[in-house]
Image (cartoon, grey):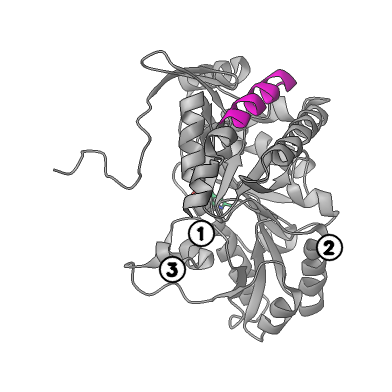
């Protein structure tokens, strides 16, 4: 019989009762070091005293009023995001897919309002992940996710990630924009080179396209800077954020330059919950932590500490680890052919470490940004045990 909870996930048989910082405890009292952070989402850890207090206080005052009224918490959060990004204006929604859906609409609207309704096509990348709505699935372009859901939404052209010639060849009279994750998250923690991001910016300028960045996973400090594109010294025209922005409370955002945002006038786009007082109070509390002086410097420091350990780990386990990649606290451990990432993930669970599998046989680490060097060391110790477990024995190798 079908479970009451629709079986869209193969869930691990773990149920967590509470968490503190980077640690989660199950209902049966087992302790786990959480280096998955609910897929890069619990950005300031579990049970953060400031976040939980702000949410409780706001919930008691007023959670939701709709966007028929002013929402001071949203106005404040938008202003703070504008002050700390390239953007001039922000739209709030509830998830990454929704932010991307709105971002795609914004790109199309920009060209339509500029007299080019025929320019609605978005260039996207192989290995991308942009969400599960029909348009964002079409932007994702993964046949496996699209199968059975009818014709994809028209207007998404895919090119190989990192290939500039293919990108330029794909630009046509109908092209409206380029949509890319600075680091492909679900696709296997594959970073675009900084030069590639700069070349995309230049190509967008050359052809009058909008550069749309999906920073749902890479943003909000995950890379060691507030936004991952800042490493390349470029600015997008529009960007999506979600995951870490609410610290576990559902919140998404579209950040846009005025030239794009000006066309999203009353009635053009909307949401019932999006940007409600509770969600934006949570967003402000997360920003209080992430924008505090020295916080991102500490993320960068602890990330460099973790990376030193991971590169050493890779050296000691060459039979298991092919490569370590990513940026900051978004790390992909690419495993050798024949070693399976979901086995590594399960071995981690046995050792008390939570991680997330990603594409291209990658084991992904995305711990809360508040981890300490001691917690990084603990994770490295557990990973060492995982890698030893996965090391093919001489007998196994002989059998192959
Ligand atoms: C997770 C993710 C999304 C989708 O976000 P949801 O909140 O699950 O809708 C979109 N883009 C990227 C890069 C993501 O990592």
In reply to whether residue 1 is colored magenta, the answer given is no
Say which label, 1 or 3, has the lower sequence index. Answer: 3
Q: Quadrant of the N terminus?
A: top left
Say which label, 1 or 2, has the lower sequence index. Answer: 2
Q: At 63% across and 26% down in the image, what residue appears?
A: 379
- Between 318 and 83, the one lying in front of the other is 318
The part of the image, by quadrant, that contains residue 288 is top right
In reply to whether residue 381 is colored magenta, the answer given is yes
Q: Mark 1 Cα within 10 Å, few/some/many (few <14, many 20+)? A: few
Q: In the current view of this chain or complex, which residue is farthest to the right?
A: 233
For residue 273, above or below residue 13: below
Q: Is mark 3 within 8 Å of ligand 1?
A: no
- Across and down, in percent, residue 232 comes to 83, 54
**Badge 2 element:** helix
Q: Which residues are magenta?
A: 371-385
Q: In the current view of this chain or complex, which residue is farthest to the bottom?
A: 173
- Residue that label 1 marks: 267
* CB contact under 8 Å: marks 2 and 3: no
Q: Is residue 340 something that shows in the picture?
A: no
- Residue that label 2 marks: 195
Give the main secondary structure of the magenta stretch.
helix
Mark 2–mark 3 Cα distance, whole angstroms, equals: 29 Å
């Amino acid at each position: 019989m079908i479970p009451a909870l629709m079986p869209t996930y193969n869930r691990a048989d773990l149920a967590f009762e509470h968490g503190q910082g980077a640690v989660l405890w199950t209902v049966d009292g087992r302790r786990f070091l959480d280096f998955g952070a609910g897929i890069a989402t619990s950005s300031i850890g579990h049970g953060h005293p400031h976040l939980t207090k702000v949410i409780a206080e706001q919930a008691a005052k007023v959670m939701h009023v709709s966007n028929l009224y002013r929402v001071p918490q949203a106005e404040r959060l938008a202003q703070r995001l504008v002050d700390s990004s390239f953007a001039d204006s922000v739209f709030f929604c509830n998830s990454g897919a929704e932010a991307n859906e709105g971002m795609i609409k914004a790109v199309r609207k920009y060209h339509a309002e500029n007299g080019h309704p025929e320019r609605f096509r978005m260039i996207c990348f192989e290995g991308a992940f942009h969400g599960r709505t029909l348009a964002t699935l079409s932007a994702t372009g993964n046949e496996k996710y699209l199968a059975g859901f009818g014709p994809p939404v028209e207007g998404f052209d895919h090119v190989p990630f990192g290939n500039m010639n293919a990108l330029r060849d794909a630009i046509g009279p109908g092209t409206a924009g380029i949509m890319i994750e600075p680091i492909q998250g679900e696709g296997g923690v594959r970073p675009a080179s900084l030069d590639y991001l700069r070349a995309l910016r230049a190509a967008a300028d050359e052809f009058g396209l909008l550069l749309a960045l999906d920073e749902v996973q890479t943003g909000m400090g995950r890379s060691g800077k507030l936004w991952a594109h800042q490493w390349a010294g470029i600015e997008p025209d529009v960007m999506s954020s979600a995951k870490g922005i609410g610290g576990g409370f559902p919140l998404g955002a579209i950040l846009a330059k005025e030239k794009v945002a000006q066309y999203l006038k009353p009635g053009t786009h909307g949401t019932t919950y999006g940007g409600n007082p509770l969600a934006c109070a949570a967003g402000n509390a997360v920003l209080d932590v992430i924008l505090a002086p020295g916080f991102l410097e500490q993320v960068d420091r602890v990330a460099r500490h973790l990376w030193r350990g991971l590169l050493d780990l890779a050296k000691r386990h060459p039979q298991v680890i092919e490569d370590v990649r990513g940026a900051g606290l978004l790390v992909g451990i690419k495993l050798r052919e024949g070693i399976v990432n979901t086995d590594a993930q399960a071995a981690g669970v046995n050792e008390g470490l939570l991680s997330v599998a990603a594409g291209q046989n990658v084991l992904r680490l995305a711990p809360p940004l508040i981890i300490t060097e001691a917690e990084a060391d603990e994770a490295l110790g557990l990973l060492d045990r995982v890698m030893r477990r996965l090391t093919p024995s001489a007998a196994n190798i002989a059998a192959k």
